[in-house]
Image: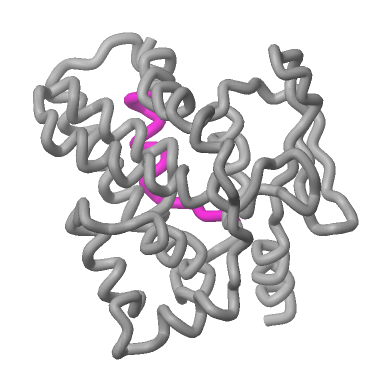
Amino acid sequence: MIKKALTVLILLHGLHMAVAQESKFVVPDYKAIKKIINDKKSASYYPLLMERFNNSDSSLTLEDFRNLYYGFLYSDKYTPYPISKYIDSCNAFLKMDTLTKEDYEKLIKFEKLFLKDCPFNIRNFNILAYSYFKIGDSVSANKNIFKMNMIIDAILSTGDGKTEKSAFHVIAVSHEYDILKVLGYKFGGKQMLTNERCDYLEIKDNQYNIEGLYFNVSKLLEKENEMFKN
């Protein structure tokens, strides 16, 4: 039951983005992002941006979130396949049919710990926001909705997913499936890595007759290769 309820927040954002996708998209300039987030004199210096992010600074712009999200590639904490030791603790609550206020408070604690390990995990921000709503803390809920929505916006600002050239740029494979949900699509069961280093996800029949979407995972693969070399 809780899993079904959790789709509400993310799908509401999808309705908003259906309009936003008509605007121009900008492919990430990774060299420029790496340079600006390492510039200690810049307002986009990564530790400063991350501090504002952790403090739920509502003045953070889309460009700030693009630097945060894609800049995380150059953090020592980045891994192509993020995982947290708190995942089992979080999932234990999600498997329950009903949760008490005390359960939600415990889930919030574990989700916050999870997000320290995986700071841009869309679905966990969704869970955290929903849990705050359930205990009556709408202020904290809205802060996390803001973060989730801006991460989504940052990804969707990079393309439309219709071709390899206009693929959405992601730093984690799990984000591909989250974006499918945001846009109201269901995974069709087939995933393929293209020669242009894009993941192609087949999607089920839909009103737009779109057969699948492309996600650029080039930087993710680069990091993966670096790990194997080391």
| Residue 9 against residue 72 in the figure, above or below | above
The C terminus sits in image quarter? bottom right
Image quarter of the N terminus: top left
At 38% from the left edge and 57% from the top edge, which residue is drawn? 117
Using the image, determine if residue 68 lies above or below residue 158. Answer: below
Question: Which one is in front, 230 or 32?
Answer: 32
Q: Position of residue 120 (x, y in %)?
A: 42, 52
Q: Is residue 35 left or right of residue 143?
A: right
Q: Nearer the viewer, residue 18 or 98?
A: 18
Which residue sits at x=46%, y=45%?
153
- Relative to 179, 221 lies left or right: right
Which quadrant would residue 64 be assigned to in this image? bottom left
- Please state the horizontal and vertical placement of residue 197, each as a whole percent of the image: 80, 58
Q: Please identify the residue farthest to the front as the structure is shown.
A: 23
Asked if residue 45 is among those painted magenta in the image, a careful observer would answer no
Side of 19 where 143 appears, left or right: left
Above or below for 115 versus 89: below
Residue at x 40% of width, y 50% of height = 85
Residue in front for this viewpoint, 93 or 210: 210
Image spot of residue 129 (x, y percent)? 26, 32
| Residue 230 against residue 214 in the figure, above or below | below
Percent from the top left, x then y, of residue 170? 60, 53
83 within the magenta span: yes
Based on the displayed image, in which of its 4 quarters is residue 119 positioned? bottom left
Task: Report the magenta residues as a range.
Answer: 81-94
Residue under the image location 28 percent in, 35 percent down: 128
